[in-house]
Image: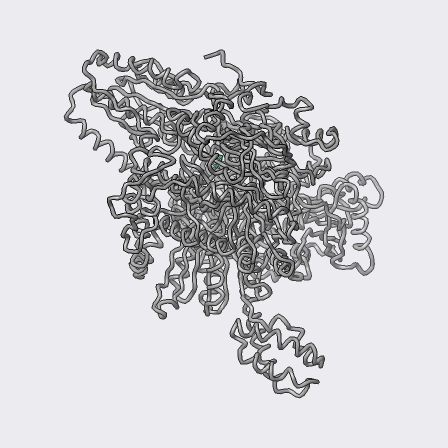
């Protein structure tokens, strides 16, 4: 089928339709993969409808559409298909043409069609066309919508007939006023294209595949009867056409001769201008092209009734003045002329334009212009003119010279912006000048006011791309000289040229030479007598002696400059004019990965070959996932390898979004290296507006799998006895490995760092998955040999372990019944084996929006549309696990157990027979999914005839956390053994439960999980380490030590947590122990930072009341120490000496004892906090124990009001779980508080639920028992009674930013650390800044419960220094919106294994989007507490926020409203599973309403309740009541 006939509205569409019908392959150039061009949306639409091409060789073949980004060297994708005999069209903006000249020459002799939409769309620059006019292509121009259709067709027909490339160009704006036209007549298109010629091209392939093969190709021309036959292919004529060759040879020689005779800029008449002409080979001449074109146009006239010539003329036959328009305004001019035909100023004026622009045929032009014409104006719309005379003016002049002789004057004009309004005055201006006595050349006509361009295709780079140049700036400051910085102004030179490597390299060399001359000038000056003072001379001499030493020259420079300034002589002033040259500059040239396609010709080669001491920074922006989809034939070469092979260069491969430190190191080394340096910088992006998050995720994938390894190579190192190569990431790709192996560097590297050995030895890119699957299956089969019963294969897809556990248990039970049961993950199963199964059972859980879990994706993709599998002999059943309440909206209910239902349907369609009906497990059933499962499983045994088997063995109950704790010997387990196992980056599952008690969790990087799976690798395991830091107070020295640990052992960042402590991420197993030891050396530890124990005890950080804070903090510390587990396992495992000998307290026979906890510790985690009114900055209501500090009448800390049973964790849709706020037990004295805490903990230890971890927190114990009973039990153990609760008042739970002074006269500055992440970026060196402050600070750091940090106890005399550093590192900026300052988010992706959605990385983005509204409604400075977490575990305490978002699925959140401003009231569910657009659609009007209708001092949470937007939650047990969006019961299933 073909695109159905209808109306066409734009030239983009008209062209796309013709290109689609006339090609095997269309290369669609787009602004980005995510943004369509004016052509590509249509192309994709046709393709999705499976519309066919007219030229397709196979029946039903649909053209291939290759989408390529405009800045990814699109023409590269043409070579491979065109060389294998495919008809290729390219739809593109004009911006790609100049950088692609090299390809254009090579492609000129293939029948490729380039449809070019001139840019910028509103006022295009035609110089792009004139610049490439001599590349050997044929050029056609269209002006109207109808012409776009007809010239597109002409272009394809002409390409086929001539065997040569055709560029069809047009300015979209020219046809703006055109009404819609009728879609092309497919039969006419078929006839005009001439399918026989197409077939002849398609049946040939020249065998070359690369882009560098064969430059001497000759076009293959048509033998169609309406045209003179011309043939030639790779120098060899085809036999059936041989007879025609002789005559062509003659014609070709003649035209060569005539072309040589025309002494102008116009191209040689032989169209194959770019190559050497071999006299024995026939060529296609300009005259041939014209004949072919006329032939095509005669067909168009006959079939479609429209007439075309090479040059277009509109106007009277007796015109005296002709206006040749080469620009987008031709149609406006024509209209005016036509309207004025009957008289007036313009009655004797005609308009001329080129339809066939190249080859330029003088005879055709002369034929088109009436002989009466005396004057010709040539209007060129050329934005950047490089020569005095415009190229079209020269063409016209040349033609006129050889013409009829009537023309006396030819005048060139610069054509500005013309539209319907200014066309008449413009035309008048043209004529006035043209007819004047002395016409002015190059007069500008039209408007200079051009509407702002819509620059889809400019040189504009995404914001993130500036990252590397900012680093250059940061490192070298004024010393950095970037030769081709995109934004620098180079008068009169186009931005494309300025950005070119040649230009940049040239200016670097010039710069070097300039400095060398300057050094000579200085030397001379040092002995001159022209200074007024004597001082400068000796300094200049010293400087000249050190001019090449970066540091010394820089140091002396300051002195020299002062001396010169004081001197004031003309010579001194002269030298001062070149101030910058006193410093040795760091010379940089910035390039793109486009250079990697043709290294030999690129800037890289120039630099390497020159041996000059210049630095190249090459930014590669191809996303890892896009490279997989990219054309496999694009031979992008490895610049790093090329440069290393060259031998004389420093080479580094870096990625700022992977390791910032490594980028710094590489740039510094490159700067120091005496010789050429190449720094490759990865910055993948899809579109210009990509968020840094996308860039980060793409970078991680690429680095992690070795596609973009991080390394540094210094060929001078060998002389110093150091290895040349340093690997800074874990994996490398094969090519690099081969290079290193050849160079013996790999062996050195493995020796130096044995930890890398195993990963280095792995080959990436080799597809081992298939073999692995096969092996696993065969191994199972062997195992089953011995069994007799019927075979049963069980496949599972599981995302949280339930499906795999069920599957494995089913298999065991099957075996016990004598079945040959096999169990494996769906992803490990070779699908081709399916038809040979007898009995197969699938168990799958439900992920995301009704999708298969990750390990079932591939299987589902392979089977869902499969029509070839014959499962007639297979018996099957499916069991699904899902949650009916997961999707609250009715329309989303279809997702419930969707994978299981889909699979059931597909298997049945493939002919499989049912073993038993599908079984569905629902989390909402009384026993969860077990309810459904228990009904389903017996049906399987029944169907297999094994339901009546007797004497089945008893199954062991599943291992619980309680079992693991009990069996661990006081938290030892097999952690030590696991740490020594280098075959995996992981620890065993049960050890992972235990390491939590030691303060570390195993995690895996979820950004790269899928990619690693695809590569057959285990997940990227690493560990999170959390310190214990009671009250969040750290010394400056500890801060520096923490900073060191994060840089050398972690992922270069620190997280300040909501429990006021340091957390490190990305610590790999081999670095775990060194990290623990380093933490220990800093006098901190990690014991009990996680696990079922009392966690880090918090305390208000309170900068204004230091005395009270100190006392409260002492209580926190005491509680923390008092409740610390006693096991010595921590020391034993982590703090061993270098020989790995255990430091044991009492020899190996020591038996631990936990006086407070006992061998099974607590049922669940346990959290204690202290808040000091009026600041509830530690959210006192959210913890198992909340202590409200009470000040006595003497102003000292008297004691605490004790709250119990607060807690944040909940499970979505499980109403048995809920967040809760603490309830009052009463008052206790300060010196007894640790005992009270102990007793509360003991009651929980003995009464907490140890069976159900979802019901094990203290909040449920208190609720189940009642507060009074609970209090009684505590008092019983304590032996005392609580006092009466004391009055107190809270004002807020957020931090107060900026400087504050306390009652003792010390100063405190609260720094805003967004979501607690301390890191350096190219624009903000927060980590370095805080480190610098730590180096000089005499006070302390207080970490706040809101994840910020206070630089505390600064004496007045130290204020200036600290303020200076804060300013220097921009840390003094606290002028953020009130919403941002009051926000907080948990870590979530990529490290938290429980995260369902982004949090820390996303909340700032969401706030960005809300800030405009805040600004607009006047709420910019109002504090609204907004929190976000990636799952309902609630680490950032979202339930107490005034507005909260809790992750439900990737990109979807539950929204809560109505929390109390100072953390006293829980919020309530407002909407479920909403995405960003819905969030914004709710928040924006709500904020507006709040701004307009709030009462004096009313907080946002209170407002939402007063206005009835949400009902108030009084305490945890009514959290699920009266929600705004009730979870409807599903009445369908
Ligand atoms: S709230 Fe959930 S997603 Fe966020 S860090 Fe805690 S467990 Fe992870």
Instruction: Tell me where residue 1458 appears, x and y as whole percent.
Output: 62, 27
Q: Nearer the viewer, residue 357 or 1460?
A: 1460
Q: Is residue 984 left or right of residue 1494?
A: left
Taking the image as drawn, is residue 1039 in sight?
A: yes
Of 1404 and 1205, which appears nearest the observer? 1205
Residue toward you, 1506 or 149: 1506
| Identity of the residue drawn at 72% across and 42% down | 314
**Quarter assignment of residue 903:** top left
Specify the quadrant of the image occupied by residue 1154.
top left
Q: Is residue 150 visible?
A: no
The residue located at (67%, 73%) in the rendering is: 577
Q: Position of residue 1184 (x, y in %)?
A: 49, 32
Residue lying at the far right in this picture: please name it. 344
Q: Position of residue 1315 (x, y in %)?
A: 55, 42
Above-or-below relation of 856 to 507: above
On-image quarter of the C terminus: top left
- Looking at the image, residue 1212 lies above or below residue 625: above
> Where is residue 1254, by image quadrant?
top left
- Left or right of residue 460: residue 1034: left
For the residue pair 321 and 1071, the one nearer the viewer reads as: 1071
Task: Answer left or right for 1069 relative to 1363.
Answer: left
Q: How many marks?
A: 0
């Amino acid at each position: 089928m073909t695109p159905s006939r209808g109306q066409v509205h734009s030239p983009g569409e008209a062209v796309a339709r013709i290109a689609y019908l006339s090609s095997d392959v269309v290369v669609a150039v787009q602004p980005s993969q995510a943004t369509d061009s004016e052509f590509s949306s249509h192309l994709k639409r046709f393709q999705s409808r499976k519309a066919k091409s007219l030229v397709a060789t196979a029946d039903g073949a649909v053209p291939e559409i290759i989408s390529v980004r405009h800045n990814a060297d699109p023409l590269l994708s043409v070579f491979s298909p065109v060389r294998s005999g495919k008809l290729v069209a390219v739809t593109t903006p004009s911006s790609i043409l100049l950088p692609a000249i090299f390809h254009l020459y090579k492609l000129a002799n293939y029948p490729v069609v380039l449809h070019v939409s001139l840019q910028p769309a509103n006022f295009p620059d035609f110089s792009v066309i004139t610049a490439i006019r001599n590349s050997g292509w044929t050029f056609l121009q269209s002006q109207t919508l109808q012409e776009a259709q007809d010239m597109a067709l002409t272009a394809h027909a002409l390409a086929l007939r001539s065997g040569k490339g055709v560029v069809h160009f047009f300015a979209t704006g020219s046809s703006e006023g055109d009404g819609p036209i009728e879609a092309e007549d497919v039969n006419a298109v078929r006839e005009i294209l001439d399918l026989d010629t197409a077939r002849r091209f398609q049946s040939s392939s020249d065998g070359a595949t690369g882009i560098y093969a064969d430059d001497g190709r000759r076009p293959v021309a048509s033998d169609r009867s309406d045209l003179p036959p011309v043939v030639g292919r790779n120098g060899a004529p085809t036999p059936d056409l041989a007879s025609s060759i002789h005559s062509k040879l003659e014609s070709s020689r003649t035209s060569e001769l005539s072309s040589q005779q025309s002494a102008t800029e116009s191209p040689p008449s032989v169209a194959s201008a770019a190559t050497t002409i071999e006299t024995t080979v026939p060529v296609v001449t300009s005259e041939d092209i014209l004949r072919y074109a006329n032939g095509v146009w005669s067909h168009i006239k006959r079939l479609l009734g429209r007439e075309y010539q090479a040059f277009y003329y509109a106007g009277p036959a007796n015109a005296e003045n002709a206006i040749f328009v080469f620009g987008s305004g031709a149609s406006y001019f024509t209209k005016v002329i036509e309207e004025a035909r009957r008289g007036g100023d313009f009655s004797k004026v005609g308009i001329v334009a080129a339809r066939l622009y190249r080859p330029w045929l003088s005879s055709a032009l002369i034929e088109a212009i009436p002989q009466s014409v005396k004057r010709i104006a040539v209007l060129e719309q050329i934005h950047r003119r490089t020569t005095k005379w415009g190229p079209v003016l020269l063409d016209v002049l040349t033609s006129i010279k050889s013409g009829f002789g009537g023309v006396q004057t030819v005048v060139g004009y610069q054509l500005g912006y013309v539209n319907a309004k200014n066309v008449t005055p413009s035309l008048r201006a043209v004529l006035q000048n043209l007819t004047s006595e002395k016409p002015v050349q190059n007069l500008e006509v039209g408007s200079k006011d051009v509407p702002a361009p819509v620059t889809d295709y400019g040189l504009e780079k995404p914001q993130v791309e500036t990252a590397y140049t900012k680093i250059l700036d940061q490192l070298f400051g004024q010393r950095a000289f970037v030769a081709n910085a995109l934004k620098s102004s180079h008068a009169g030179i186009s931005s494309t040229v300025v950005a070119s490597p040649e230009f940049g390299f040239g200016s670097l060399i010039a710069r070097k030479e300039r400095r060398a001359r300057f050094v000579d000038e200085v030397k001379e000056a040092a002995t001159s007598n022209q200074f007024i003072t004597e001082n400068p001379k000796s300094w200049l001499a010293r400087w000249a002696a050190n001019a090449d030493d970066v540091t010394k020259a820089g140091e002396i420079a300051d002195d020299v400059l002062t001396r010169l300034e004081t001197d004031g002589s003309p010579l001194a002033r002269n030298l001062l004019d070149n101030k910058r040259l006193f410093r040795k500059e760091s010379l940089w040239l910035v390039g793109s990965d486009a250079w990697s396609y043709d290294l030999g010709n690129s800037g890289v080669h120039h630099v390497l070959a020159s041996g000059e001491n210049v630095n190249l920074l090459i930014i590669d922006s191809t996303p890892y996932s896009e490279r997989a989809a990219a054309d496999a034939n694009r031979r992008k070469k490895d610049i790093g390898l090329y440069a290393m092979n060259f031998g004389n260069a420093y080479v580094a491969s870096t990625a700022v979004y992977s390791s910032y430190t490594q980028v710094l190191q590489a740039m510094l080394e490159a700067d120091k290296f005496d010789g050429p340096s190449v720094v490759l910088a990865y910055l993948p992006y899809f579109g210009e507006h990509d968020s840094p998050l996308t860039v980060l995720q793409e970078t991680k994938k690429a680095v992690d799998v070795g596609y973009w390894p991080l390394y540094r190579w210094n060929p001078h190192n060998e002389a110093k006895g150091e290895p040349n190569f340093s690997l800074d990431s874990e994996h490398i790709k094969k090519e690099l490995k081969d290079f290193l192996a050849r160079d013996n560097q790999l062996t050195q590297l493995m020796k130096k760092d044995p930890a890398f050995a195993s990963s280095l030895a792995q080959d990436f890119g080799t597809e081992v998955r298939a073999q692995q699957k096969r092996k696993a299956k065969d191994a199972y089969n062997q195992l089953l040999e011995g069994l007799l019963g019927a075979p049963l294969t069980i496949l599972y897809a599981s995302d949280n372990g339930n499906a795999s556990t069920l599957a494995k248990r089913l298999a065991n039970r099957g075996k016990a019944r004598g079945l040959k049961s096999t169990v494996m993950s769906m992803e490990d199963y070779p699908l081709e084996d399916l038809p040979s199964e007898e009995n197969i059972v699938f168990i799958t859980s439900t992920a995301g929006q009704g999708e298969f879990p990750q390990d079932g994706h591939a299987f589902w993709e392979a089977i869902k549309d499969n029509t070839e599998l014959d499962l007639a002999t297979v018996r099957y059943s499916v069991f699904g696990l899902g949650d009916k309440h997961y999707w609250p909206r009715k329309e989303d209910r279809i997702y419930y157990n969707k994978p299981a239902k889909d699979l059931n349907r597909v298997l049945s369609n493939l002919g499989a027979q049912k073993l038993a009906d599908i079984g569905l497990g629902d989390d909402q059933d009384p026993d969860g999914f077990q309810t459904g499962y228990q009904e389903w499983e017996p049906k399987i045994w029944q169907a297999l005839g094994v339901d009546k088997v007797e004497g089945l063995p008893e199954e062991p109950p599943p291992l619980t956390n309680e079992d693991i704790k009990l069996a661990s010997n006081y938290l030892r387990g097999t952690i030590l053994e696991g740490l020594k196992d280098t075959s995996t980056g992981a620890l065993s599952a049960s050890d992972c439960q235990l390491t939590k008690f030691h303060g570390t969790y195993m995690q895996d990087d979820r950004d790269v999980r899928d990619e690693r799976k695809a590569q057959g690798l285990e997940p990227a395991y690493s560990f999170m380490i959390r310190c214990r830091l009671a009250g969040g107070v750290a010394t400056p020295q500890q801060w520096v030590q923490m900073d060191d640990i994060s840089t050398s052992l972690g992922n270069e960042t620190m997280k300040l947590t909501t429990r006021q402590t340091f957390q490190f991420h990305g610590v790999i197993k081999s670095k775990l122990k060194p990290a623990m030891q380093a933490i220990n050396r800093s006098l901190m530890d990690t014991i009990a930072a996680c696990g079922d124990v009392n966690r880090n005890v918090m305390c208000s950080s309170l900068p204004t009341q230091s005395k009270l804070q100190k006392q409260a903090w002492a209580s926190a510390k005491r509680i923390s120490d008092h409740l610390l587990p006693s096991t010595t396992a921590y020391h034993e495992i982590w703090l061993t000496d270098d020989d790995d000998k255990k430091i044991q307290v009492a020899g190996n026979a020591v038996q631990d004892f936990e006086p407070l906890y006992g061998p099974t510790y607590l049922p669940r985690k346990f959290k204690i906090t202290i808040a000091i009114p009026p600041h509830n900055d530690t959210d006192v209501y959210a913890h198992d124990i909340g202590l409200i500090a009470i000040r006595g009448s003497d102003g000292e800390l008297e004691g605490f009001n004790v709250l119990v049973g607060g807690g944040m964790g909940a499970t979505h849709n499980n109403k048995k779980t809920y967040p809760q706020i603490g309830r009052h037990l009463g008052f206790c004295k300060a010196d007894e508080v640790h005992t009270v805490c102990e007793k509360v903990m003991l009651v929980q230890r003995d009464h907490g639920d140890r069976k159900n971890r979802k019901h094990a927190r203290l909040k449920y114990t208190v609720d189940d028992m009642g507060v009074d009973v609970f209090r009684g039990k505590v008092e019983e153990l304590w032996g005392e009674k609580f006092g009466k609760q004391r009055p107190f008042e809270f004002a807020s739970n957020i931090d107060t930013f900026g400087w504050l002074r306390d009652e003792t006269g010390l100063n405190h500055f609260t720094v805003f650390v967004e979501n607690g992440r301390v890191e350096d970026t190219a624009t903000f060196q927060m980590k370095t800044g805080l480190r610098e402050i730590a180096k000089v600070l005499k006070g302390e750091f207080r970490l706040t419960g809101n994840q910020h940090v206070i630089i505390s106890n600064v004496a007045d005399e130290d204020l200036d220094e600290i303020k200076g550093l804060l300013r220097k590192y921009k840390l003094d900026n606290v002028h953020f919106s009130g919403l941002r300052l009051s926000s907080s988010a948990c870590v979530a992706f990529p490290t938290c294994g429980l995260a369902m959605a982004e949090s820390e990385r996303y909340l700032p983005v969401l706030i960005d989007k809300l800030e405009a509204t805040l600004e607009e409604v006047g709420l910019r400075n109002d504090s609204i507490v907004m929190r976000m977490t990636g799952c309902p575990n609630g680490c950032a305490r979202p339930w107490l926020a005034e507005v909260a978002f809790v992750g439900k699925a990737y990109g979807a959140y539950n929204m809560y409203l109505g929390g109390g401003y100072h953390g006293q009231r829980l919020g309530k569910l407002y909407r479920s599973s909403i995405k960003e657009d819905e969030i914004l659609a709710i928040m924006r009007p709500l904020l507006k309403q709040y701004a307009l209708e709030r009462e004096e001092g009313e907080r946002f949470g209170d407002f939402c309740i007063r206005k009835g937007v949400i009902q108030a939650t009084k305490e945890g047990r009514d959290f699920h009541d009266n929600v705004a969006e009730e979870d409807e019961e599903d009445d369908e299933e």
